[in-house]
Amino acid sequence: MNFVKSWVLAGAALFLVPAVWAQVTVSGVRYEQTSELRGTRLQLNGAGTRYKAIFKVYTAGLYLAKKAGSTEEVLAAPGAKHMHITMLREIDSSELGKLFSRGIEDNMDKTAFSKLIPGVLRMSQIFSEHKKLSSGDTFDIDWIPGTGTVIMVKGAQQGEPFKEPEFYNALLRIWLGPNPADWKLKDALLGKAA
C-alpha cells in the first residue's frame, strides 16, 4: 500500500512543480515553453546562444505552431512564427543590421536575394535608427499570417509589416540556412542541442 501511496504522491507533486520547469534558460535568459502571438499559441522549438569567437552576443528562441527538426520543415511550416532575441552585450545597431543583410545574402541565390533588396534595406534602416542595442535589450521577428513580417525592437513595432512571406523565410535563413550565423545556434533552434 505504501508503494501505491508513494506513486500517487509523486504524481500529485508533478502538478505542483514550479513554473521554472516550463522554461528553458539559455545564458541566463529564460524562454517560456509556449508563447502567444496575436491569439495563436506557439511552442518553443529551440533556443541557444550566438557566439562571435569566444564572446556571447545574444540568445535566440524560435517558436512555431508545431515542432520542426529541419530548416525545410521550419520554412514550410504554416501559421505564425516567432523569433525572440535578447542581447548579451552592447552592439552597434547599424552593424547588426548589416550583419543580418549579409546573413540573408549568404543564404540565398543571387536572383532570389535581388527581389528582397528593398526589404533588406528597410530592415537595415530600422536597426540603424536605434544606434545601439545594450545587454538585456530585446527584439522580435514575427510572421503573422495575413499581416506579414513584424519587427519589434525593445517592445515597439518598427514601421509597417513586410508583406512578402519570402522575406520572413530569408530572415530565418540567417540562423537556419546553409551558412548560418552560428552552427551551434542553428542546432539549438532546431531542437538538436541546448
Image (cartoon, helix red, strand yellow):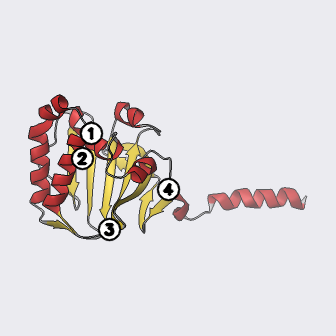
Q: Which of marks 4 and 1 is nearer the N terminus?
A: 1
Q: Which of marks 2 and 3 is nearer the N terminus?
A: 3
- Of labels 2 and 4, the one closer to you: 2
Which one is nearer the viewer's eye here, 50 or 5?
Answer: 50
The x and y percentages for residue 100 are 21, 50
| Extreme-front residue of the structure | 53
The quadrant holding residue 167 is top left
Give the labeled residue for mark 2. Answer: 103
- Residue at the location (28% across, 37% down)? 169
Q: Earlier in the sequence, mark 2 or mark 4?
A: 2
Give the labeled residue for mark 3. Answer: 88
Cα distance in 3D space between marks 2 and 3:
20 Å
What residue type is disc 4 on?
Ala
The quadrant holding residue 136 is bottom left
Contact (Cβ within 8 Å) of mark 1 with mark 2: yes
The quadrant holding residue 92 is bottom left
What residue type is disc 3 on?
Leu
- Residue at the location (24% across, 46% down)? 103
Which one is nearer the viewer's eye here, 59 or 37?
Answer: 59
Q: How many marks?
A: 4
Above or below — where is 27 with respect to 144?
below
Using the image, tell me which numbered label, if any, was put on residue 107. Answer: 1
Cα distance in 3D space between marks 4 and 1:
24 Å
Give the labeled residue for mark 4. Answer: 194
